[in-house]
Image (spheres, grey):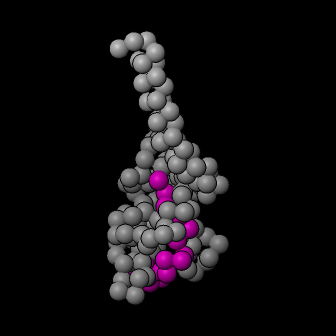
Amino acid sequence: MGRFAAGLRVGLLAGTAAVALVPELRRLSRSWSSRVAVVETSMLPTLRPGDWLLVDPDAYRRRTPDAGDIVVVSDPREPDRLLVKRVVGVGPDGRLDLLGDDPSASTDSREFGPVEPSAVQGRPWARYWPPRRWGSLG
């Protein structure tokens, strides 16, 4: 293979990688303004107080969360307060049952009942702080 062909192939691969990054860069951009800090222990061991999460506010625009998803939801008792919980079930009426990963330290659907999908503010998808805990949330 000649130098030109090899260079073209490398250039095409780099271009393909750049195009593949565009959706991730968009998600990062919209998530930055929706980031949240974990302040309680209800999601231990998955999330710890002091973790900062990037939250995609568009993740459930076209679909309802599934059981197992972690969501940021408005607290039904105090709508200005945000909760980070795991969806443990979707009822026949479409409402979501939420539970903390540490139920003994969690205020969740056991106390306030199932929530409307419209209460979901987004899906945490990455932890960016502290650096030693950086990574995807699945």
The residue sitting at 61% across, 54% down in the picture is: 30
Q: Position of residue 31 (x, y in %)?
A: 58, 54
Taking depth in this image into account, of 115 and 29 the one nearest to the observer is: 29
Residue 64 seen = yes
Q: Position of residue 130 (x, y in %)?
A: 52, 41
Q: Residue at x 37, y 69 (%)?
A: 66
Q: Position of residue 42 (x, y in %)?
A: 44, 63
Identified at 38% across, 52% down, the residue is 138
Residue 76 vertical placement versus 43 (above, below):
below
Displayed quadrant of residue 81: bottom right
Establish if 92 lies above or below 84.
Answer: below
Question: Is 57 on the left-hand or right-hand side of 91?
Answer: right
In front of the other: 69 or 99: 69
Number of marks in the image? 0
The magenta segment: 109-125
Q: Nearer the viewer, residue 39 or 57?
A: 57
Q: Residue furthest top?
A: 3
Which residue is depicted at the point 54% across and 63% down?
58
46 or 58: nearer the viewer: 58
Residue 106 in sight from this viewpoint: no
Residue 94: percent from the left, percent from the top? 41, 82
Looking at the rendering, in which quadrant would you find the N terminus? top left
